[in-house]
Amino acid sequence: MIAGIILAAGESSRMGRDKALLPLGRETFLEHLIEVLRGEVSPLLVVLGHHAGQIETRLASFPETQIVRNPDYQQGQLSSLQAALRALKNQPVAGALVCLVDHPAISKEVVRALLERFRQRAARRPGASEQKATRIIIPTCHGRRGHPVLFASGLFQELLDAPVEEGARSVVRRHAAEVDLVETGAEGILLDVDLPADYEALLRRWEAPTAGGDEPRGGQP
């Protein structure tokens, strides 16, 4: 099994509104990410912190999600990932696909491509020319790295031990030789929504392909 983790605990201070609850087509950012991941990963964890109670009430229609509250969310994103990994401690997963709520414009196609690559690498026996196994899968668009990122379970303890101020990138850098990049051609993996202007730009992209109609659930701009 490969777990899915959605990090949605931040204060969204630069946005001025909870990004998890921002509308995107017929859904919110968080609802869209859940729709994209449901049926593809198991278990599916959502990490909440700021306004956790308010956001959690919106998830009643997603009983398959496991809510994890991070009391230390102000320490940063890695603290939320660590909260999720602790919740996974006794669950037999081979890896975890980590999604950020401020990178909502991903599709099932991207998720499936990452999961399939991970399974292919896991099934391959290391040979003489393959000294290190793939432990991190990252999507790219025209060579630029994006999100979500898939970590093999063998890195969970290292992520748990990492200083929160360094973030998960420090682990990725240490294992650069074990990173596999998957070219997706999907610009949505690059869209980081931090500011109101970013949100307005995303909405213009999202609505353009289906002007006059609703955005398909789990769609891609």
Image (tube, helix red, strand yellow):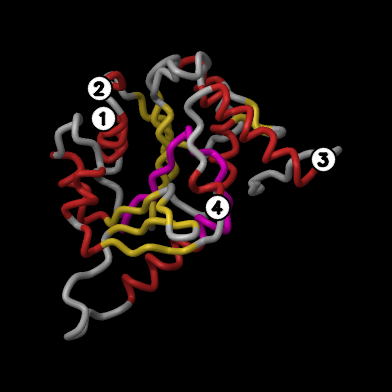
Q: Earlier in the sequence, mark 4 or mark 1?
A: 4
- Numbered disc 1: secondary structure: helix
Find disc 4 in the rendering and name its residue: 39
Circles 2 and 4, Cβ within 8 Å, touching? The answer is: no
**Which labelled disc corresponds to residue 75?**
2
Residues packed near mark 3 inside 10 Å, few (<14), some (14 to 19) or many (20 plus): few
Circles 1 and 2, Cβ within 8 Å, touching? The answer is: yes
Residues packed near mark 1 inside 10 Å, few (<14), some (14 to 19) or many (20 plus): many
Query: Mark 3 against mark 2, which lies toward the viewer?
Result: 3
Is residue 44 shown left or right of residue 135?
A: right
Q: Viewer-proximal residue, 68 or 221?
A: 221
Is residue 198 shown left or right of residue 67?
A: right
| Amino acid type of the residue that numbered disc 1 sits on in the rendered structure | Ser
Q: Earlier in the sequence, mark 2 or mark 4?
A: 4
Residue 213 percent across, percent down from the top left: 83, 39
Circles 4 and 3, Cβ within 8 Å, touching? The answer is: no
| Amino acid type of the residue that numbered disc 4 sits on in the rendered structure | Gly
Q: Which residues are magenta?
A: 93-112
Q: CA distance from mark 1 to mark 2?
A: 6 Å
The answer to whether residue 203 is magenta is no
Find disc 3 in the rendering and name its residue: 211
Which residue reaches farthest right?
212
Q: CA distance from mark 2 to mark 4?
A: 31 Å
Residue 71 percent across, percent down from the top left: 29, 19
